[in-house]
Image: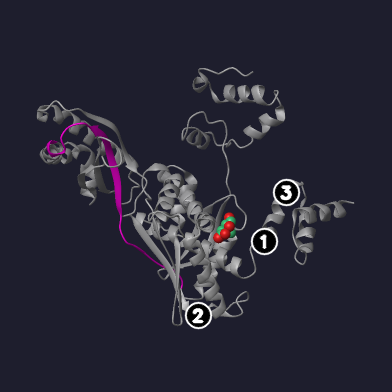
Amino acid sequence: MQKPISGFSKWNKSQKIDWLINTYFDGSTDAKQTVEQYANADEKLQQLHDEFIENTVSNFYLPLGVAPNFLLNDKLVTVPMAIEESSVVAAASKAAKFWLERGGFKAEVLSTTKVGQVHFIYNGNYDTLQSYFQHIKPRLFEEAKPITKNMEKRGGGILDIELRDKTEQLDHYYQLHATFETLDAMGANFINSCLEQFAQTFETGFDAFNTDSSNLDIVMSILSNYVPDCIVRAEVRCPISDLKDKDIVDPQEFAERFNQAIDIAKVEPFRAVTHNKGVMNGIDAVVLATGNDFRAVEAGIHAYASRDGQYRSLTHCSIDNDTFRFWIEIPLALGTVGGLTRLHPLVKFCLEMLGQPNAKELMKIVAVAGLAQNFAAVKSLTTTGIQQGHMKMHLMNILNQFGANATEKKALVEHFKTETVSHSAVVSALENLRH
Ligand code: MEV
């Protein structure tokens, strides 16, 4: 049985790789070549990647695609997408083109407030705690000044700090619930530094105020990735008759069926999860390409999707007389400064391509990518079904898996223009070709 290893993090990269190869791959040179072939020849660039995380042994590539023709608030945008799933970029591009001819996307940021909390346990009288909070509140702001002064100069900072009684949910549990404006920064470091300072000020001042020898114990101080007051809305709309295209023969019927599909995703969580997964195909890809934290975005958005107690669709649809309207409203805490945004060369490239957006502009672009993705998916689902297009895109993956060369690929792409793609059909067509 394998023994635990100690001191691993201190080894250099080649020692780590050798250990992996000897431990898990019987010393295979092929395995070593697999992991090493993704190292960048440019040593400085490789070092940059090595230092993003710990114990880096290689780079894990994702394709970076672009979806052009997004008309967003009357400006054309080419959207960068880092994603491994076939069909997603194609679907985004198709939806962009579809709406380009119908007035484009409109988006607006409705709010930009971020949240952080100091969670603590207190076993004394609530009135005393409230008086203490009122007494210490100005000092919470004051002692955080060294952290907040630059942000304040730019127009951001701490918006408010509240004392919240959570004892109905958990015995003796209270919070300092703070709200922040972090402008173009995602704000995690800023918020967490403020919170740790609040905790220290709050705890230190408590002893002098504490006359009934009650106990105050800070459990943790951390931002929340749930940002229901940092909201962006994006929408498309057009006269129903304008929805006609090669897959939409009867626009009225399409609009109604599409609307029905959204209603289903509102009431049925099994469908809502897949529906929103499609939305996240667009959102995550842009969030990743622009160097933002997709786990934070995912967690916050899914919590928002279940804010009334049931998990529901993130997108909405209405048919008012002759007008078809389709929109999304989501929480997004994004940054266009700090983090990876000035470090990762491809992130810099993507942000430049987008015209160096500020955080609000990026929120709009990301929301539009999510909406477009969902439009494309639900349009396919309610008309042709998704497998036809999906399997065409999947064809290349299957061909690559079986090591098809360029001539074989060309012949089989041609062949499957008129044949149904399935895994077995591709394999047998490739075999036929090879014999
Ligand atoms: C696949 O990645 C996403 C879809 O399943 C989304 C949906 O069903 O709406 C096509």
Within 10 angstroms of label 3, few (less than 14), some, or many (20 or more) residues? few
Q: CA distance from mark 1 to mark 2?
A: 26 Å
Give the amino acid type for the residue marked by disc 3 in the picture.
Asn
Residue at numbered disc 3: 400
Is 112 magenta? The answer is yes
**Which numbered disc, 3 or 2, marks the residue that appears first in the sequence?**
2
Residue at numbered disc 1: 387
Query: Residue 143 appears at what percent x and percent y?
Result: 17, 36
Query: Residue 343 appears at what percent x and percent y?
Result: 43, 42
> Pointer 1 and pointer 2: residues touching (CB < 8 Å)?
no
Residue at the image position 69 percent from the left and 51 percent from the top: 397
Residue at the image position 62 percent from the left and 19 percent from the top: 2
Residue at numbered disc 2: 240
Q: Is residue 231 left or right of residue 245?
A: left
**Which numbered disc, 3 or 1, marks the residue that appears first in the sequence?**
1
The one of 182 and 336 positioned closer to us in this rendering: 182
Q: CA distance from mark 3 to mark 2?
A: 42 Å
For the magenta stretch, what is the residue range?
104-128
Give the amino acid type for the residue marked by disc 1 in the picture.
Gln
Position of the N terminus, as image quadrant, is top right
Mark 2 residue element? helix
The one of 197 and 48 positioned closer to us in this rendering: 197
